[in-house]
Image (cartoon, grey):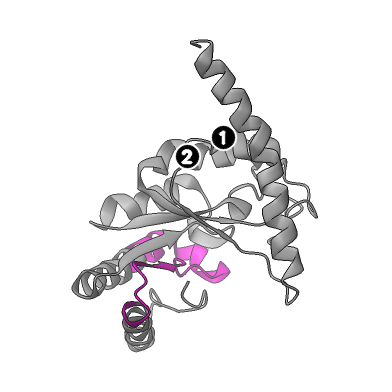
Amino acid sequence: HSPYYLEIAHPYEEVRRGALKEALKILEVSRKLESTSATFHPFTPGWLASIKEKARELNVVGFRELVKHGRELGVQILVENVDHGAFRSPPDIRYLLDHVDGLLMTLDVGHSVINGGLEKLKSYLKKCGKEIVHMHIHDNDMSSDLHLPIGAGRIPWPEVLGEISNYRGTVTLEVHSSDPDYLRISKEKILSILKPQEGARHQRYEQGD
C-alpha cells in the first residue's frame, strides 16, 4: 500500500510530477520485496471535488503513468475505493478502470459501506467485480473511516461475507492498532463467520441446489 496522501493528480504539474517521482520509488521497493502489486488511492481531497471533471482527467493521467512503470517493473497497479471526494462512489472508480488500460482494483470493504451500507458494497461488486484482485477488511460505524477490529463496529459481517463469498483473491486485515492481538481476534471472527457459511454452501451443493 502506497502512502494515501500522494498527490498523483494535483492540478499543479510540478507537484504532480514530484508525487509521481515518489510513487515510482515505491514501485522500485515493491519489486525488490517481490511484491506483485501496489495499491494507490486516487488523489481526491475535498476541495478537488468542486472540479470533479478535472480531477477525473488528472487521476487518469496519473494512473496511466503508474501502470506504465508498473508494467516495466512487474508490479500490478491497483486503485482503491475511498469514502470521500471525487471518487467516493462505484461509478467514479469504474470511470478510472475504464480509462486506464491495465488498472485493477483493491476493494476496501470498510470504505465501501460508509454512507451507503450493504447496497453500496453490492454496487462495487456489480460494477467492478471482474477487476477486484485484492480486498481490505476492517470495521467501522458505517459513517466514518475508523479501521476498527472486526466486531468493534457496526458492519454486518455475516451479510458482507455472504456478498463476497465467491471472491478468491488476497485479503488484508487493515486494522489500525499497535496491538497484534486485535489482528488475531479479527481473523478468528472472520473465520468463525465463514465456517458455517461454507458448511451451508456444501450442503446445498450436495443437495443439488
Task: Label 1: state its secondary structure.
Answer: helix
Residues drawn in magenta: 31-58
Residue 17 versus residue 68 in the image, above or below: below
Q: CA distance from mark 1 to mark 2?
A: 8 Å
Label 2 crowd (10 A; few <14 / some 14-19 / many >=20): some
**Where residue 151 appears, x then y in whole percent?**
78, 51
Task: Determine if the magenta segment contains residue 50.
Answer: yes
Specify the farthest residue to the front: 206
- Between 98 and 53, the residue placed more toward the observer is 98
Residue 141 versus residue 7 in the image, above or below: above
Q: Nearer the viewer, mark 1 or mark 2?
A: 1
Residue 66 image-quadrant placement: bottom left
In this orientation, does residue 139 appear? no
Residue at 47% in and 35% down: 166
Q: Pointers 1 and 2 in contact (CB under 8 A)? A: yes
What residue does disc 1 label?
163
Residue at 51% in and 38% down: 123
Residue 33 versus residue 99 in the image, above or below: below
In the picture, the disc for residue 125 is: 2
Residue at 34% in and 69% down: 58
Residue 175 image-quadrant placement: bottom right
